[in-house]
Image: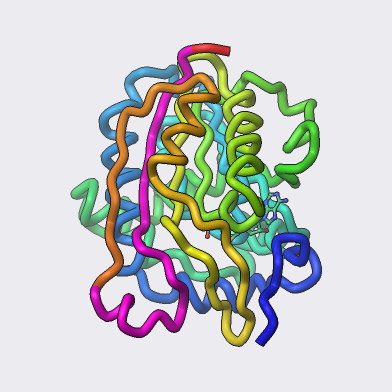
């Protein structure tokens, strides 16, 4: 089977299949949700929640990066590369028929991690998220990776997950992408990156996609060269059965990293 490459996302990436393949089992996202929960618990007092803006860059059709964030920011800008990814987020934002079901994830964050029991709490969180989302397009290879009217340097938090290792073909390209994202942050703003370590491919159904193998050390170097100081980095190694039978992908670990911007 031929390998699909970074330049083929617009024409070949199956948004619905991606959701089914990677987001139908809430447990596989426990690591990401716990780390984001801990990040926002620890650092959200550092910015003004009445004015702070969060950008999820390359968010695709996925709302996971800002479940914990929603009470701590004024606006959530969800930037997605593909038209059908943006439509998917709009469907969810409007609570429309056919929208992907994120309730198990929201329940896990609100009820289990935050300890707010009962149906009202997680339903209120979903409503709060919906009220704050604005959907925009993005392309990491553009001079301005999101619309420049979105005010570069205005974001307090930029989140990105599983995007740059999919979009970039070289480590230098990845580093250039990180620099562009850090440029969107205000001084003292935070970036969180969830990535897969040393992955060369991943499957979406029958489609086999190329991925840039990158290590935690290289990602740390990228954020430091972009003017940030690393605050958190945690690896979640893949289980043994994954190494014995890598049917979905050949990643060695899932890694969460958070850093803050100390210079322009
Ligand atoms: C593996 S998906 C990750 C989606 C989501 N962030 C997540 O956590 O599951 C890779 C994403 O990279 C996006 N992408 C591909 N090329 C891109 C580019 N040039 N600029 C920005 N995003 C891109 C795709 O549209 C896709 O949503």
Q: Residue at x 51, y 19 (%)?
A: 227
Decide if residue 84 is in sight here: yes
Q: Nearer the viewer, residue 120 or 253?
A: 253
Q: Quadrant of residue 151?
A: top right
Residue 111 spot, x, y in % from top left: 24, 55
The quadrant of the image that shows the N terminus is bottom right
> In x, y percent, where is residue 8?
76, 66
Q: Nearer the viewer, residue 57 or 195?
A: 195
Picture quadrant of ligand 1: bottom right
Pick whichever, 181 or 124, lies toward us.
181
* Residue 152 shown in magenta: no
Q: Quadrant of the C terminus?
A: top right
Q: Which residues are magenta?
A: 240-262
Image height check: is 144 above or below 64? above
What is the number of callouts on the image?
A: 0
Q: Is residue 258 left or right of residue 3?
A: left
Q: Can residue 94 be seen in this snapshot?
A: no
- What colour scheme has been applied to the protein in the rendered image? rainbow
């Amino acid at each position: 089977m031929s390998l699909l490459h970074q330049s083929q996302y617009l024409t070949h990436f199956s948004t619905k299949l991606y959701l089914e393949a990677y987001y139908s089992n809430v447990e596989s996202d426990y690591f990401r949700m716990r780390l984001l929960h801990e990040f926002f618990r620890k650092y959200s007092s550092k910015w003004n929640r009445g004015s702070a803006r969060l950008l999820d860059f390359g968010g695709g059709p996925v709302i996971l990066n800002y479940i914990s964030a929603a009470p701590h920011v004024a606006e959530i800008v969800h930037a997605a590369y593909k038209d059908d990814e943006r439509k998917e987020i709009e469907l969810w934002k409007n609570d429309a028929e056919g929208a992907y079901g994120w309730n198990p994830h929201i329940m896990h964050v609100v009820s289990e991690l935050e300890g707010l029991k009962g149906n009202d709490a997680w339903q209120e969180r979903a409503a709060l998220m919906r009220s704050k989302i604005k959907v925009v397009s993005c392309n990491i290879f553009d001079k301005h990776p999101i619309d420049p009217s979105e005010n570069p340097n205005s974001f307090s938090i930029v989140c990105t997950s599983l995007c740059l290792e999919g979009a970039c073909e070289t480590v230098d390209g990845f580093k250039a992408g990180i620099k562009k994202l850090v440029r969107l942050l205000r001084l003292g703003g935070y970036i969180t990156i969830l990535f897969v370590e040393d992955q060369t491919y991943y499957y979406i159904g029958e489609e086999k996609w190329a991925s840039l193998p990158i290590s935690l050390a290289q990602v740390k170097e990228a954020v430091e060269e972009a003017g940030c100081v690393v605050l958190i980095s945690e690896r979640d190694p893949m289980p043994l059965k994954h190494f014995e039978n890598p049917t979905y992908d050949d990643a060695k670990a899932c890694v969460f990293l958070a850093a803050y911007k100390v210079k322009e």
